[in-house]
Amino acid sequence: MNLTIKKKYLQDAIQAVTHAITSRTVIPILSGLKFDVEDNKVVLTGSNSDITIQTAIHAMIEDVEIISYAQPGSIVLPIPHFSEIIKKLPDETVHIEVQDNFKTVITSGKAVFTIYGQSSEEYPQIPIQENDDPLLLKGKQLETLIKQTVFAVSPTETRPILTGVHVSFEHNSIVFTATDSHRLALRSFPIDTADVSERESVVIPGKNLQELTKLITDPEATIKISFLHNQILFAFNETYFLSRLLTGNYPDTSRLIPTEKETTIHAFTKDLIQTIERADLLSSRDQNNVIRLDTLGDNMLEISSNSPEIGNVEEQLEAIAIEGEPLKISFSSRYMLDTLKTIDSERIQIDFTGTMRPFVIRTPEDENILQLILPVRTF
Amino acid sequence: MNLTIKKKYLQDAIQAVTHAITSRTVIPILSGLKFDVEDNKVVLTGSNSDITIQTAIHAMIEDVEIISYAQPGSIVLPIPHFSEIIKKLPDETVHIEVQDNFKTVITSGKAVFTIYGQSSEEYPQIPIQENDDPLLLKGKQLETLIKQTVFAVSPTETRPILTGVHVSFEHNSIVFTATDSHRLALRSFPIDTADVSERESVVIPGKNLQELTKLITDPEATIKISFLHNQILFAFNETYFLSRLLTGNYPDTSRLIPTEKETTIHAFTKDLIQTIERADLLSSRDQNNVIRLDTLGDNMLEISSNSPEIGNVEEQLEAIAIEGEPLKISFSSRYMLDTLKTIDSERIQIDFTGTMRPFVIRTPEDENILQLILPVRTF
C-alpha cells in the first residue's frame, strides 16, 4: 500500500470515522482505524459495538487532485496516534507507505513517522448495503427530528427500550418519538417521495443519534436511510453511518396525549425561557427542580420556586394571551427548559388539562412538533 | 442595608472575589460572600484558607452613577446562588435590601428573589493593610514574572516549599524562581523605583499566583505589593489580593546554573515548538515523554522519539546556527514545550554542557529570562 494525499481531506475523514472508535472495546482491533486504498479512492472505517462509520475520499474532487498516487492495499492503524500525527504534520501533502510486518511510514515535509499497524484481515467484516429504495430526508430535516426528540430519552437502563428514539410512519409522515415516562417529545415530517405506510417502526439508541448529528454538517445534503435487519444505515455525501437498533416493544404513547384542554397559554418563547431560568436558580434540587406557574388574570403569569434553606423567587410575566380556566401547576424547570430550547419558533402555545394531567407544548406555525410534560403534585 | 446599583459592575466584582470562594471549606461562613455597603461604595470580600480577594465598587465611576442609593449595612450571602442570581437578572439595575433575620430581597425588573444571608459578625476578621512603601510593578511585568515561572513549580507535596514560587531581590531586580528539581524557571525585572536590596525573599504558593493572573486584566495597571507577616498583598485598581506565604527554606538554586557551555543552538522558537510537538506524539509516556536531539552538521538538528509498541518519529530541522561540540542529548518533550510556549521571543538560544548536565534556554533579546532543564540519561 502506498498513497500520496492532501492532508486536509485525510484529516477531515479521520475526524469523522473516529467518532465510532473507542479504546474501551472488547474486540482490540476495533480500537484502530481501517484504512483501505483503492485505485481511485481511500476508504476509512471506524466501528464499535454500537455504530460503524465509513467514509471515502475520491482521487479528484471538483477538478482538484486530492490523491496524486495510490497503490492499493489495506491496514488497521492505531487511534489516537494516527489521527494526532496527521493533524500535526508540517506539510500540506502526506505520503503513507505500508512496509513489511504492517510497519507504516508516514512522511510529510522533513518529518518521518513510523507506526505499527495491524492486518486488516483481523478486522471484522461489516457489510454496508443500502436498500434499493432508501427513504430520503434533507440534512436539516433529520437534524430537527433528532434535536427535538433525543433529549427526552431515558438516561437510565431501567427500561432499555426508552433509551432509544422510536421512528415510525403514519399518514405518509415519519415520526420520531422519545420518552423517559415523565415527558414525551414528538416530531414528524411529511414525506412525499415514497409510500411509507408499509414500513415497520424501529428504535434507534439516543446516543447514536447524537453522534450522527455531529456528522451532518450540510443542511441541504440528501440523507438516504436504509432499514436493515437489526440495523439502520444513514448514507450522505461519501459517508455511511450504521447503527444497531434496540429490540423490544416500544410503549404505545398515543394514549398519553390529551385530546382536550382547559387552559391555553400563548407566550413569547424567549421571555418564558429567561423567566424559567431565573426560577430554576432557586428550584429545589432534591425535588427534580420543581417550579410553579400560576395564572393571575390580565394575561399575567407568575412563575415561582422555593429552595428550602436557600431562598425563593417570584416573577410576573405578561403572556400574549391566556384562554380558559385559571391554573396553578408545578413542573420540572429542567424538563421545560430542555423542551423550550429546542423550539425555533418565536411563539409557543401550552395546553393544560388541569393541575395533575400532562400538558402539551406546541408552536403556532408548525403542527409537526408536540412536547408533553407530566406535572409534579405539590398542592 | 439597602442598595440600588448597576448590575454589570456588581456582576464583575462578584466574579473577581468568587475566585477565592470554595464550598470545600472547614469554616462554613467562608463559603459565602461578604457584602458591605458603605455611604459611597460597596465592598465585596471572598476568602479561603489560602487567599482573600476584596474589591470595591464606588458610587461614581468617571461621572457615571453606579450606585444610585445606598443605606449602609453588612451581610454574608450564599455562593454560588447570589452570583448566579445577579448574572441572570432581567434588568440593568438591581435593588438589594436586607430585612429581618438576614433575609435579603433582590429585585430587578419583575423578578423578586429572596435569599437567606448570614450575619457578617460571624465572618473572620481579615485585616488588609498595605505597606507604607509598597513595591510597584506594572500589570504586564507581574504577569510575565508569573507566567514564565509558575509552570515549573512542583505539582506534588513531597517537598512542599517547591510548590511555591520563590520571590527574591538581587542587584535592584525582583527575581521569580520555580523548580520541581527536574527543571528550573527564572525570570527577573529591574526595579528602579525603590531600593530593594534589604528586602527578604518569600515563597508564594504557585496556585495562588495562577489565581492572581486571572484578575490582572490591565497590563498597564500599577500593582502595589506589600510584604506582610506570613502574607503578601497585591493591590491594583479597586482590588486587593492577599495570599499566604509558604514557610521553610527555599533551596539555593544558583549553583544549579552552569557557568560554561560546550554547544550552543540558535533556533526559531516556533519551528522548534512544532517539531518537538510532533516528536512528543510518539514519546514514551512511561518514560516522562523523553525525546532525543542530535546535531548533524550544516546547522541541522535531528529530533526523534520512540514509543515501544506504537512507533517512532525522526525529523530534521534547520537551526539558525549551531556552535561548539557535536551533541546527542535526551530530555522531556513536555518540559521543553512548557518552557518554549512561555517565551514570547521569535528566536531562542540553548546552551548545553554535555549530555548529562542541565541545559539552559535563553532569549537573545532579554537577559532577564533563564530556563533550565535536566536531561534524561538514555545513552
Image (cartoon, coloured by chain):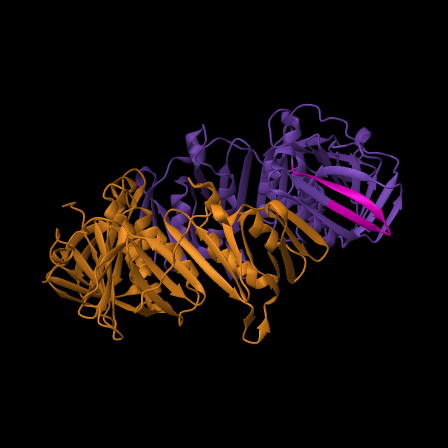
Chain colours: A orange, B purple
**Residue A100 image position (x, y, % from top left):** 63, 47
Front-most of residues B62 and A94: A94
Question: Which image quarter: residue A192?
Answer: bottom left
The residue nearer to you, when weighing B363 against A189, is A189
> For the image shown, how many numbered marks are present on the structure?
0
Horizontally, residue B110 falls left or right of residue B274, namely left
Inspect the magenta stretch and tell me whether residue B35 lies in it. Answer: no
Residue B297 is inside the magenta segment: yes
Spot the residue most to the right. Answer: B324
Residue in the foreground of this view, choosing between A322 and B5: A322
Q: Residue B197's spot in the image, x, y percent?
A: 80, 34
Q: Main secondary structure of the magenta part?
A: strand
Q: Is residue B147 left or right of residue B97?
A: right
Position of B66 with respect to B258 (left or right) is left
Q: Quadrant of the C terminus of chain B?
A: top right
Range of magenta residues: B289-303
- Image quarter (top left, top right, bottom left or bottom right) of the N terminus of chain B: top left
Q: Position of residue A257 (x, y in %)?
A: 14, 58
Q: Is residue A198 among the parts visible in the rendering?
A: yes
Placement of B248 over or under B146, stated as above or below: above
Q: Nearer the viewer, residue B318 or B66?
A: B318
Q: Residue at x 66, y 29 (%)?
A: B162
Vertical placement of residue B315 versus A145, above or below: above
- Residue A274: image location, x then y, percent: 33, 58
- Rendering quarter of residue B194: top right
Residue at horizontal 60 percent and vertical 35 percent from the top: B243
- Residue B310 versus residue A220 in the image, above or below: above
Instruction: Left or right? Give the position of B363 relative to B29.
Output: right
Does any portion of residue B369 appear in the rendered image?
no
